[in-house]
Structures are given as C-alpha cells and as structure tokens.
Image (cartoon, grey):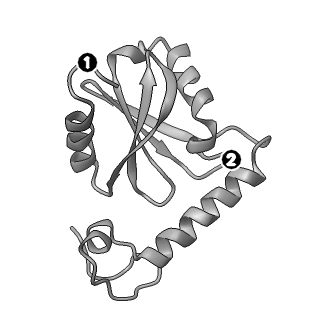
C-alpha cells in the first residue's frame, strides 16, 4: 500500500509517482548515486548476491545489496541461471534493484541486450507491466 511519506527520509510526498514508489525524487537520486558508487567500487570485487524466482514465464531477480550489484554483474547472473539449466529464451526477466524498484532486463536467448524501465515498487504490478511491454515471444 502506498504511503504519503518517503520510506528513506520520512518527508511528505506530493507527486503521484513518488507516492506510488514510496520514495521522493531526492532520495531516489541519492540511492542511485550510492548504487553507482558501489558498482564502481566493486567492479572487480565479489560477485553479486541475489535471489530469483520463476513465476510462470517470468524470472524475477532480487538484488540483496551485497558485493557487486545485479546491475553491474548481470552477464554473470544470467550465466548462473543458464548454468542451472534454465533455458532463458523461454522467459521474460525483471529485477528489483537495491532501492526496491523493479525494472526489465532485455535479452536475446539469454544474452543481455539492455535494461528497460518498469519503474514499479509492487511485484505483481511490475510483472503485469513486464508481460505487457514484452508481449508474447519477445524479451
């Protein structure tokens, strides 16, 4: 359920997008800067720590905010999944970053092609948006 206060700093939120995401624009930028800083600091550091689940034809990856970010380690994360015997060409993939926002991962048969915004805080809303954006048979 959305709240009218930022979950990071507690300040009141007035923008509908900020209310839906439960985080204000200043805190979101601050978190992204921190995430980028962590990515830069850990380029050659430990692998990312993540969880994932398979939900129908969707794979949902959650960044646990340890080691490299999933964003920075995505090629290896996809290789891990393929190494577990998952045929990535059969799935749409999304991930939740360290600020709790779900976004999409574009891929061609498991080869990373780019990120695309879902910009959703809620899993089910993000999943529905992922399926709507990617359509049948597209990643």
What is the crowding at mark 1: few (fewer than 14 residues within 10 Å), some, or many (at least 20)?
few
When asked about the image quadrant of residue 22, the answer is bottom left
| Residue beneath the point at 27% across and 84% down | 14
x and y percent of residue 2 in the render?
23, 71
Of the pair 130 and 113, the residue shown nearer to us: 113
Residue 75 to residue 116: above or below = above
Looking at the image, the residue that sits furthest to the right is: 44
The disc at residue 108 is: none
| Residue beneath the point at 49% across and 78% down | 26
x and y percent of residue 117 in the render?
37, 48
x and y percent of residue 72 in the render?
63, 42
How many discs appear? 2
Q: CA distance from mark 2 to mark 1?
A: 33 Å
Dot 1: element: loop
Q: In this image, 1 relative to 103: left or right?
A: left
Residue at which label 2 appears = 67
Q: Name the quarter where the N terminus is drawn.
A: bottom left
Q: Mark 2 or mark 1: which comes first in sequence?
A: 2
x and y percent of residue 122 in the render?
27, 55
What is the crowding at mark 2: few (fewer than 14 residues within 10 Å), some, or many (at least 20)?
many
Observer-side mark, 2 or 1, equals: 1
| Residue beneath the point at 62% across and 28% down | 76
- The answer to the question of whether label 2 and label 1 lie on touching residues, with beta carbons closer than 8 A, is no
Dot 2: element: loop
When asked about the image quadrant of residue 108, the answer is top left
Residue 1 to residue 132: above or below = below
Looking at the image, the residue that sits furthest to the bottom is: 12
Residue 25 to residue 138: above or below = below
| Residue beneath the point at 67% across and 45% down | 68
Residue at which label 1 appears = 137
Q: In this image, 23 relative to 17: left or right?
A: right
Q: In this image, 11 relative to 73: left or right?
A: left
């Amino acid at each position: 359920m959305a709240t009218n206060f930022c979950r990071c700093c507690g300040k009141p939120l007035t923008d509908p997008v900020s209310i839906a995401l439960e985080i204000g624009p200043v805190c979101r930028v601050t978190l992204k800067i921190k995430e980028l800083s962590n990515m830069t600091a850990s380029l050659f550091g430990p692998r990312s720590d993540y969880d994932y689940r398979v939900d129908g034809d969707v794979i949902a990856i959650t960044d646990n905010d340890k080691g490299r970010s999933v964003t920075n380690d995505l090629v290896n994360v996809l290789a891990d999944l393929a190494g577990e015997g998952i045929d990535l060409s059969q799935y749409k993939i999304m991930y939740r970053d360290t600020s709790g926002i779900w976004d999409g991962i574009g891929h061609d048969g498991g080869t990373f092609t780019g990120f695309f915004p879902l910009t959703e805080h809620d899993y089910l809303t993000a999943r529905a948006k992922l399926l709507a954006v990617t359509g049948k048979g597209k990643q």
